[in-house]
Amino acid sequence: SEGAGAVAAYLGGRGVRLASLLDEGACVVEGLAPGASARVAVTGPAEKGYANVRLSVEGKGGHSSMPPARTAVGLLGGALSRIERSPFPLRITPTTTAFFRALARATRFPVSVVLRHPKLFALPLKVVFSRPAETRAMLRTTLAPTVLRGSDAENVLADRAEAVVNVRLLQGDTVEGCVSQLEQKVADRRVRVDLLPGSDWSEPTTATTPDSWAYRRTRAAIEETLPDAVAVPFLVVGATDSRHFEGLSNASLRFVPFRMTAELITTMHNIDERISLENLELATRLYRRLIALLATE
C-alpha cells in the first residue's frame, strides 16, 4: 500500500485515467485440464479479494504444571480446526465460466464438450478442478491459518493466544461478510474474530471483459509470440498491485510471459525461487510485441 497504493492515490488525485494495466499474476502452464493438447497462457482479467482475519483468546497465565480445564491455546486450536472443517462452498463465477469455455480450445473431445457447457456440467467440473490446489482456489473463498502466537516459554501458560487466517475472497463475497461467516464457523464467544489491525485488505476486483480492447490485444500478443499456446482468462488467486488501481482503469490484466513447470511453481515464495534465461528472453519478445499492438490504437 505504501508503493503501488500511494502511486494510485497520487494519479487518482490528479484525475488520471489509464487505458489499461498489465501486472503479474498468471503464466504459461501445461496440464491445466485433463486431455489438454496445448500449453495454456492463463491471463487474469480479475483477482480475488484479500484480508487477514485475527482470532484471539484471552486466558489466564501461570505455570503449565497447573493448567485450567481449557487453555487459551486449546480454545484457539479448536476454533481453527472448526474453520478448516467448514470451507466456503465451491462456486463457478462468470470469470471461471469464461475460463472453462476458453480452455475447451486446448482440449480434445469429450473434455472440450464439458468445458464449453459449464452450467450443464457444473458438478463434474467442480469435482475435477477442486482436486489440484492451483485450480481449487479459483472455485471458492479460501481460508489459510498462517500465524500463531501463544506463550513465550514452554512452561508458561499463554494469557493470550492469537492466530491470523489469510483469506482470499471469491467474486460475490465481501470482507465484512467473510468475517461474519468466520464468527459463525468458530461458534465460540470466547474467541474474538476481527480484521487484523493495520493489515492491508481489498475486495475482489471487477472483471475485465474478454472482448475489451486491452484483453484482445494482450491475447493477440500472447498467441503471436507463443503459437503453441492458447490464451485463457483465469481468476488470479493471489493479490497483485493492480488492485490498488481498480478505480483508474476499466481494463486490468495479470500475466507474466513465463513457461512454468509444476516444479517451478512450487518454488514461488519458497526456497530457490528462480526463473530461466529462456523465460527472460520470451518475456522480452512478448512485451515488445504487446507494446507495439497497444500503440496502434
Image (spheres, rainbow, N blue to C red):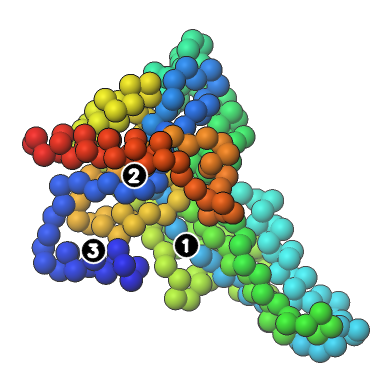
What amino acid is found at the position of numbered circle 3 in the picture? Ala
The residue nearer to you, when weighing 125 against 232, is 232
Residue furthest to the left in view is 297
Residue furthest to the top in view is 109
Q: Quadrant of the C terminus?
A: top left
**Earlier along the polypeptide chain: callout 3 or callout 2?**
3
At 81% from the left and 89% from the top, the residue drawn is 62
Query: Considering the numbered disc 3 on the image, is that residue within a helix, a strand or a loop?
Result: helix
Examine the rendered structure and indicate whether residue 142 appears above or below residue 151. Answer: above
Query: Considering the numbered disc 2 on the image, is that residue within a helix, a strand or a loop?
Result: strand
At 65% from the left and 51% from the top, the residue drawn is 86
Residue furthest to the bottom in view is 62
**Earlier along the polypeptide chain: callout 2 or callout 1?**
1
Residue under label 3:
8
Q: Position of residue 163 (x, y in %)?
A: 63, 69
At 75% from the left and 73% from the top, the residue drawn is 73
How would you rate the neighbour count of disc 2 (Cα within 10 Å): few for under 14, some for 14-19, many for 20 or more?
many
Q: Position of residue 193 (x, y in %)?
A: 57, 70
- Find out whether the residues at labels 2 and 1 contact each other: C-beta distance under 8 Å: no
Residue under label 1:
51
What amino acid is found at the position of numbered circle 2 in the picture? Arg
Residues at marks 3 and 2, CA–CA distance in whole angstroms: 17 Å
Residues at marks 1 and 3, CA–CA distance in whole angstroms: 20 Å
Q: Position of residue 3 (x, y in %)?
A: 31, 67
